Image: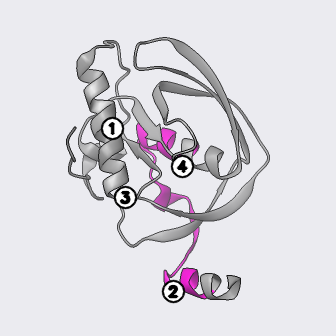
């Protein structure tokens, strides 16, 4: 596996809609493995192919070791519900954090690395991360959805209050 370079804003690849994946082969599997390794190395919870310079509809989300990695190839949002505002960041925008409103619930259809179709439903933080990555595949960046910029020092204050 390889650690890939994260593409930073304002690279034009980040705002271009991605091409559908039509070939499900060993190269795609290697790309997914490299994306996961890159995401972990950069302390992320999600990564989309344009963030590593590939304009294809591939994204991953991984919250912790107890859950499987969510690999989304050609994902389509089939339903959403509710709404909530929470803080987001993005590996392509180092140091930028902001409050973004997103649906609380999402249902998607996507393909596995071998091309098999699957459906997934998620809520809360998991839904937020999935929708953030699917936005990347559509050329939509979170900075356009920020309602309020959040200074990183606000995170430190929250952590101190939790002790």
Residues under labels 1 and 2: Cα distance? 30 Å
Residue 151 % position (x, y):
50, 82
At horizontal 36% and vertical 63% (from top left) the residue drawn is 93
Q: Nearer the viewer, residue 24 or 106?
A: 24
Tag 2 near tag 3, CB within 8 Å: no
Judging by the rendered image, the residue that carries numbered circle 3 is: 91
User: Which range is magenta?
Assistant: 131-157
In the rendered structure, which disc, 3 or 4, sits on the residue that comes first in sequence?
4
Tag 1 near tag 2, CB within 8 Å: no
Judging by the rendered image, the residue that carries numbered circle 4 is: 63
Judging by the rendered image, the residue that carries numbered circle 2 is: 153
Residue 102 % position (x, y):
66, 51
In the rendered structure, which disc, 2 or 3, sits on the residue that comes first in sequence?
3
**Vertical comparison of 13 with 158: above or below:** above
Q: Secondary structure at mark 2?
A: helix
> Which circle, 2 or 4, is nearer the viewer?
4
Disc 3 residue crowd, few under 14, some 14–19, many 20+, Cα 10 Å: some
Residues under labels 4 and 1: Cα distance? 18 Å
In the rendered structure, which disc, 3 or 1, sits on the residue that comes first in sequence?
1
Q: Nearer the viewer, residue 120 or 77?
A: 120
Q: Which mark is residue 49?
A: 1
Q: Tell me where residue 147 sits by quadrant.
A: bottom right
Horizontal side, residue 28 vs residue 99: left or right? left
Q: Is residue 144 magenta?
A: yes
**Vertical comparison of 162 with 11: above or below:** below
At horizontal 56% and vertical 42% (from top left) the residue drawn is 130
In the rendered structure, which disc, 1 or 2, sits on the residue that comes first in sequence?
1
Residues under labels 3 and 4: Cα distance? 15 Å
Disc 1 residue crowd, few under 14, some 14–19, many 20+, Cα 10 Å: many
Q: Secondary structure at mark 1?
A: helix
């Amino acid at each position: 596996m390889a650690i890939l370079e994260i593409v930073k804003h304002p690279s034009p690849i980040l705002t271009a809609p991605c091409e559908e994946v039509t070939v499900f082969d060993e190269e795609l599997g290697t790309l997914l493995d490299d994306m996961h390794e890159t995401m972990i190395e950069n302390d992320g919870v999600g990564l989309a192919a344009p963030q590593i310079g590939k304009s294809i509809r591939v994204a991953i989300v991984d919250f912790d070791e107890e859950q499987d990695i969510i690999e989304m190839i050609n994902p389509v949002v089939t339903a959403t519900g509710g709404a909530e505002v929470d803080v987001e960041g993005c590996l392509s925008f180092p140091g930028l954090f902001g409050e973004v409103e997103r649906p609380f619930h999402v249902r998607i259809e996507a393909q596995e690395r071998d091309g098999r179709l699957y459906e997934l439903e998620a809520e809360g933080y998991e839904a937020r991360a999935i929708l953030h990555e699917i936005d990347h595949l559509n050329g939509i960046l979170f900075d356009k959805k920020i309602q309020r910029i959040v200074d990183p020092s606000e995170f430190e204050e929250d952590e101190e209050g939790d002790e």
